[in-house]
Image: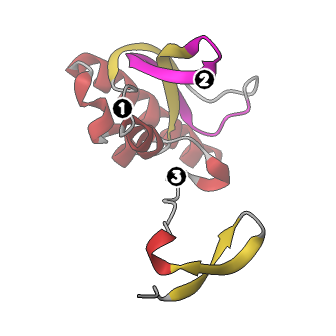
Amino acid sequence: MASEMVMAYGDHGLEPTPATEVVEIAAIPAGAGNLVIPSTIRWLAQRGGHIPTRLLRVEKPNKRNRAKHVYVTFQCTPFPRYELESGPVYGDWSGCSVRIAADVNDPLFLGLTDRERARIASAVHATARADREER
C-alpha cells in the first residue's frame, strides 16, 4: 500500500517524499546571534557528556573581550569534539554565556557546588548592575 507523499527537503532540494521517511530536525536552542547559552549545552548533553563537574573560570564583560555577557568555562564529563579516522577525539571542558539570573539557575549547573554557582550569580548580578548604571 502506498504511503502518503509530502514535500520535504532531500538530496536535490524540495522533493516528494513518503511521509514515513520524513524526519524533523530539532533546532539547537541558542541566544540572540546564535549565542551558546546553558540550554544549548543541555541540548548537546543529550548525546552524552557536557555535564559540568567543576567551574574553571568566570569572565565578566570588559572592553578587551567586548562580550556583553558573563562567560563561564567549566570542566565537564567527556564528549566527542570531532571524529578522526582513528576514532573520536574527546573534550573535557566546555563553556557558555550566562546572560541573566534565569541562566544561573539552569539545571545544567546542578553538578557545580553552591560556591561555584554563587560565583556565577555574583558576576551576572554585577554585570547587570554595571549595565544599568551605564544607561
Q: Is mark 1 on a helix, strand or loop?
A: helix
What is the magenta segment's predominant secondary structure?
strand
Helix, strand or loop for disc 3: loop
Query: Which is in the foreground here, disc 3 or disc 1?
Result: 3
What's the distance in space between the residues labelled 1 and 2, CA to CA? 32 Å
Q: In the displayed structure, would residue 83 be above or below residue 126?
A: above
Dot in front, 1 or 2: 2
Q: Nearer the viewer, mark 3 or mark 2?
A: 2
| Residue plotted at (64% across, 44% down) | 134
Spot occupied by residue 31 in the image (x, y as percentages of width and height)? 56, 52
Q: Position of residue 79 (x, y in %)?
A: 44, 22
Where is residue 106? Give x, y as percent. 31, 42
Along the line of sight, which residue is nearer the eye, 128 or 66?
A: 66
Which residue is label 2 attached to? Answer: 82
Disc 1: which residue: 121
Which quadrant is home to the N terminus?
bottom left
Q: Is residue 72 visible?
A: no
Q: What stretch is highlighted in magenta?
A: 66-87
